[in-house]
Amino acid sequence: MKLWNVFKMELFKNIHDRTNLLLMLTFMLINTIGGLVISDYQNWLRLPSALATLFSFSVFGTMIFLFLYPYQMARVDYKNKVMSLLIASGVSRVQYYFVKVGATLLFSLLSIVLLVIFPLLIILSFHNMQLVFEFFHFYFEIDLATLGIILFGWLSTFSILMTAVIISKGRRFSIFVFLGLFLISSQVAHIFRSLVGSPWWEISNTATFMQHLITMTAMGLIGILVLRRQNL
């Protein structure tokens, strides 16, 4: 099976995941409507309690969903025994690893756009289109180093998540493996900073960037090595 066909299969599977799509649509609508209503109130306390509760739940649920969505996509092939069938068809485990990472990252980014950025743009445009232009102006005026750190921080966390799912073979306790790996990587970074002991290390964007890059590389290698040796 060609690698491109495997990637298209991943896209098809995620696009037709009705449960997640329904959740995304629900959160997107509530976030948009709730944001529009709240933006018309000068005081949060004046909001009807039911609406305030619903909107608060939606925002909290969105935050949870943005984490659980890639987690669920990463482990679903272990649950459905799809991975073992693909490997049996001749697909390289390393190739499949990168295809899975790419597809999961793509849909994770789309979920952020749909649940956060899209409702925000609708809310801003409802009041004044100028606010939309100011939003994009602010976005493009952000220092590239800051954007890079945010992006690599997200990718670093994602790499830990993928490694945790692979180590646990997608079982439910993989979330605890993720938390353990996250704490270990944080402690290693803290110890390394302490050993360096330089104020430059604490404030340098380059140092933070390198920390995330090392975490991504280490977790990626661990994930690939474990996947290559697993009995699927």
Image (tube, rainbow, N blue to C red):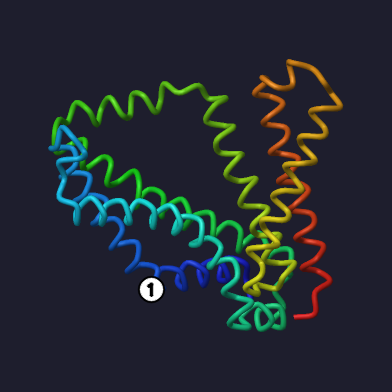
The amino acid marked with disc number 1 is Thr
**Quarter-wise, where is residue 174 in the image?**
bottom right
Q: Is residue 216 left or right of residue 231?
A: left
Residue in view at x 75 percent, y 80 percent: 232
Who's the residue at 82% across and 62% down the image?
225
Q: Is residue 115 above or below residue 143?
A: below
Residue at image mark 1:
19
Q: Quadrant of residue 154?
A: top right
Q: Quick one: quadrant of the N terminus?
A: bottom right
Q: Is residue 111 left or right of residue 212?
A: left
Name the foreground residue: 182 vs 48: 48
Q: Position of residue 19 (x, y in %)?
A: 38, 73
**Position of residue 142 measured from the top left corner of the image (x, y, whole percent):** 45, 23
Task: Identify the residue shown where x is 67% and y is 58%.
Answer: 178
Relative to residue 143, is residue 198 drawn left or right?
A: right
Out of 217 and 179, give the one closest to the viewer. 179
- Residue reaching furthest to the right: 195
Q: Is residue 72 above or below residue 184?
A: below
Q: How many marks?
A: 1
Q: x, y (%) of residue 200? A: 73, 16
